[in-house]
Amino acid sequence: MTESNSQPRVLLFGAGGVGAVYLYLLSKVSSTTAVCRSNYDVVKKDGFTINSSIFGKNIYFRPNVVRDCEEAVSSGPKPYDYIIVCSKAIPGVIPQLIKPAVTLGQTAIVLVQNGVGIEQEYHDAFPDNPIISAVVYLPATQRPAGVIKHGEVEKLQIGSYPSSAPNERASAFTKLVQSAGATAEFYEDVQPKRWFKLLVNASWNPICALTLSKDTDVLGSLDEASGVLLATMLEIRDIAAAYGYTITRDEVEYQLGRAQARIPTNAGIEPSMLQDVQAGRRIEVEAIVGNAVRMGKEKGVACVRLEMLYVLAKALDLQIERRRQ
């Protein structure tokens, strides 16, 4: 491995808010390149300005950026040790786009993406490369292009995919992130962490996107809102249980309570799907909602609320796609 002889080579695919923060941190301990798409011209010219509640304000950072993975390969003779995918989890798209930069048996593919059931297409496309699954907690927005606002949480929960696969590369990546000053935790099986985060993602994301509302605005709309959210989260809990991952009712109520606690201060959260709809971007409906619904049906788990959200969010996503064409 090249990372044992020198600084590891890292390619970041998807330089949005989350990607830009980790690009900045990892640039301290590795050789980094970023594939920028919609924000390429701005970042190439002016770099990033990061305003973080954790890492500092007005951090100016000008990374090495390219337009695509073909250009990334031509930028240096050595293979990439890690490709960190921070783009939206839209199925059937990313594996083909990163393929030129993947070196057989060498490049570990790190999925810093939302949802469940997202890893298999990478495993199928690159069966001889390590697949690392990472659950991210990092509230960040990029408005305008190149300007990042990051809140008070930063954490990666990391594990190999599948969980039975060798974990040396996942462990090494965890240590690399830690050495950059970020928070990273390694797990023998990271899938329970994905399901726990899905409690919030699969409920709040589509509801806020469909209503164009922050989470606190939804809860404040009428008394029944809290009950609907709780029932949706309990469906997600039941699907997770069918696959052997236990989430207690107390944990479900804790996740709902976090949003309820923000109502008095009006400190609502704009989930990623809401941000995408506002910007006219496609949403991660399959990774966050569709996969969970399909997995629930396979196990005979009733998920009528989640299925309704899937139908509505899917229609919204297709409408966004039509407008972009």
Image (spheres, rainbow, N blue to C red):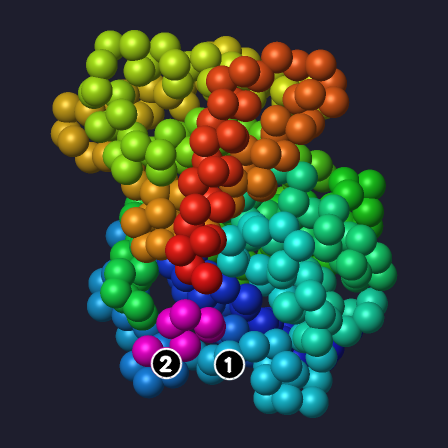
In the rendering, which numbered label is found on residue 304? none
**Residue at far left of view:** 265
Does residue 248 appear to the left or right of 94 in the view shown?
A: left
The three-letter amino acid code for the residue at tag 2 is: Asp
The three-letter amino acid code for the residue at tag 1 is: Val
Rendered view: 268 above or below 184 = above
Question: Nearest the camera: 128 or 41?
Answer: 41
Q: Residue tagged by mark 1?
A: 66
Q: What element carries label 1?
A: strand
Quarter assignment of residue 149: bottom left
Q: Earlier in the sequence, mark 1 or mark 2?
A: 2
Location of residue 201 in the rendering, given as x and y in whole percent from the top left corner: 46, 34
Q: Residue tagged by mark 2?
A: 41
Location of residue 183 in the rendering, given as x and y in whole percent from the top left corner: 48, 50
Rendered view: 258 above or below 227 = below
Location of residue 156 in the rendering, given as x and y in whole percent from the top left corner: 52, 47
Q: What's drawn in magenta, residue-wise?
A: 36-42
Residue at point 38%, 72% (across, down): 39
Location of residue 7 in the rendering, given as x and y in whole percent from the top left corner: 61, 77
Q: Quadrant of the N terminus?
A: bottom right
Residue at point 63%, 50% (across, down): 91
Q: Is mark 2 on a helix, strand or loop?
A: helix
Rendered view: 82 above or below 90 = below
